[in-house]
Amino acid sequence: MIDWIPILQTLLGRQVACVLVLLVQAKGSTPRDVGARMIVTQSKSFGSIGGGTLEYRVIEEARRLLKSGSDQKPVRHLRTWHLGADAGQCCGGECTLLLETVPPLNHAWLDQLQHYQDSAPCVMVTSLNASALSAYDGKLIITEYLAGDVIKESLADDQEIIAPLVRTLLASPGKAAYSLQLVYRKPGDTPPAYLLERYGPDMFRLVLFGAGHVGKAIIRVMSGLPCHITWIDGRPDMFPATVPHNVTTIVSDTHDRIIADAQPGTFFLVMTHSHPLDLDLCEHILRRGDFAYLGLIGSKTKRERFTKRLIQKGLGQGVVRRLTCPIGIRDIPDKDPGVIAVAVAAQILQQRNTIAPVTDTAVTLATLVKV
């Protein structure tokens, strides 16, 4: 999924009007899942809803909205596309898309969403009715601590119905950073009254030690995924002049604090220029224990030597078995840095297979009354 918030903030900072495109409902065979998003300007587009004729026509539709829309107020437009009849695509499914103009103004909801999604779950309520939430640009950001007062003040007649659903989303135990729900006023009613989107901290965090050839290739591949990467090396000249927006570089020869400060569930990759440093890093990460993945670049021989040394340092065999070395999915023997990076990215994605998927749940206000 595109990390759209910083892109939108940059465009608005340059006074560029945009259209947000969001796939809110998918039926049958479709090229992307619910939650796929694009940003469209008069000259560029960012992200993808699946490519092909559908995406081309949606971009055209978005640019028509930009030409006809207001410079002061957002315009929201829902449209369902039948991929066979409307786009000539063989998928044969059906996509409902929300196209939303974003004028080049200060949008408080965008800053709030950026702030809260990096620290705790929040729900963004978008009114699909021009009159509701008009004082808030049609959007409301709700957190666990603000839910009661904000909903009571802002949602008027719908507060008693929306509040239970928002609280349920905020309390969702799954690991998914994002989920989406449409809320209808009554069964069979169209269009839906509200769109609720749950955001949370980045789906996963990667700490990468080493900025050599493979490290650089890892960054090129992994930076396109929904994650935040902390990239560490003690040699400042090893980093490129610019890095992707979701990559933070740290020049440091000491790593204890970096490992200690990493969030639980972090993915670690160790590939420095020094085997003694690699061993020290692996020991500290293994002793911490609450990581999702620890990968060490190297051969089976390196793993055997590290296993022996780590056990000598007092680590149990069960703990040491959590070290992945060699890294990357099996049956890809190529040692080219780019190939290694793809194999490692695939392995990390496999490791994350317990993360709950984006959900597409249509909810009616009538059913929520019983909650």
Image (cartoon, helix red, strand yellow):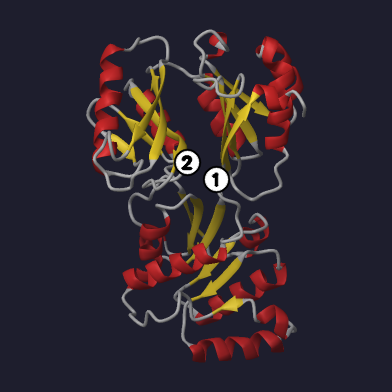
The quadrant in which residue 305 appears is bottom right
Q: Give the residue at mark 1.
A: 358
Q: Amino acid at mark 1?
A: Val
Q: Residue at x 39, y 38 (%)?
A: 94
Judging depth in this view, the residue of 298 and 201 nearest the camera is 201
Q: Residue at x 34, y 42 (%)?
A: 48
Residue 30 location, x and y as percent? 38, 46
Q: Mark number for residue 72?
A: none
Give the tally of numbered discs: 2
Say what secondary structure mark 2 lies in: loop
Judging depth in this view, the residue of 181 and 166 nearest the camera is 181
Please tell me whether residue 346 is drawn above or below residue 16 in the rendered image. Answer: below
Q: For the residues marked 1 and 2, what is the alpha-carbon distance in whole angstroms?
A: 7 Å
Mark 1 and mark 2 in contact? Answer it, CB < 8 Å: yes
Residue 265 location, x and y as percent? 64, 59
The quadrant in which residue 165 appears is top right
Please tell me whether residue 66 is drawn above or below residue 340 in the rendered image. Answer: above
Q: Amino acid at mark 2?
A: Val
Q: Give the residue at mark 2.
A: 34
Residue 3 location, x and y as percent? 44, 41
Judging depth in this view, the residue of 280 and 226 nearest the camera is 226
Q: Residue at x 49, y 20 (%)?
A: 191
The quadrant in which residue 82 appears is top left
